Image: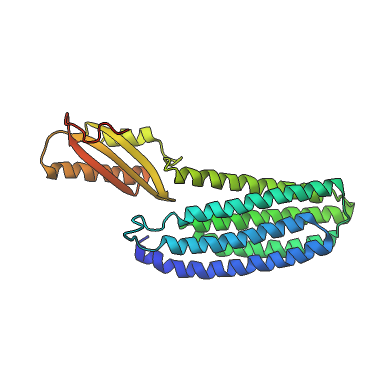
Amino acid sequence: MTEHAHTHAVPESGKRLAIVILLNFTITAAEIIGGLISGSLSLLSDALHNFSDGIAVIIAWIAIRLSLRPRSEKHTFGLKRAQVLAAVINAGALIAISIYLFVEAWQRFIEPQAIGGVVMTAVATIGLVANVIGTWLLHRGSKQNMNLKAAYLHLFSDAISSIGVILGGLAITFWNVYWIDPVLTVLIGLYVLKESLMIVWRSLHMFMLAAPDSLSLSEVREAVLGVTGVESIHHIHLWEVAENDIHFEAHIEVPDQPLHDAESIRHAIEKTLHDRFEITHVTLQVEPVGGECSTAALP
């Protein structure tokens, strides 16, 4: 997709995100009211989940807008990592919510309360319908944009959560199984906690300039050495500036030759790295075989 096409795709995604945000906050309000009326903690936990996802979608949208800003003399990479920062903020909020849900669920285990299963089921069903609409709205955009995909997966997990609450409501209505409410709360909390920790771990890796998990540095090295004319490679660095924006830099040694020939080797390396590993930015320092590296003392 060209930059021009991508720019035009953003307003369309923005309209869909706006609808999803409205749906999320509507669901949240309905589930909070329903949870308070029915006394269902799992419904309230699902409401918190929906609320956090609404905030997550807002942050994701802001991050997308920031990441599209052009580079400047101050921010030479642009603001591409705004999306990574947004992921950390969202994950941190979800972790806090998960801990809160665990505490509340424990209180319900100690002091069980009667729960209105009919209200719980009805409200959760409304939430399920809204979440299905939201996932449908974001499904197409999620194929081209990882940030939208994350929002899509958030809503998809909400839909699964709503199904769990519905089943719990039915169990309470027909069999008076009240303990299932805190159990569902813990299960929802565990799922949210797991997903959040994975996001934090991935984001920290990116902030620490770690090589992408999907790439093997040894395979990348061998691919470069496989290019005709490359004798050796050292001072290799591989990292992600942002999602799907992988950078690579290295020093390569080539036989002493005219600059034009060395340039063709550089182009061949760039093409190989892009085609095989989807590396988007390559910086190479070309050195003659046996020559002295100007940064030999560096790691």
Which x, y percent locates residue 124? 74, 61
Residue extending furthest toward the left: 258
Is residue 216 in sight in this rendering? yes
The residue shown at (60%, 64%) is: 134
Task: Using residue 76 as the reference point, say whether residue 254 is left or right of it.
Answer: left
Residue 46: x percent and y percent? 71, 57
Can residue 146 be seen? no
- State left or right for residue 248 relative to residue 121: left
Viewport quadrant of the N terminus: bottom left
- From the top left corner, tell me how far across and down residue 2 is, in percent: 35, 62
**Quick check: 240 above or below 155?**
above
Q: Residue at x 33, y 56 (%)?
A: 76
In the current view of this chain or complex, which residue is farthest to the top? 290
Vertical order, 140 against 197 (above or below): below
Vertical relation: 101 (above or below) 128 = above
Q: Is residue 284 left or right of residue 40?
A: left
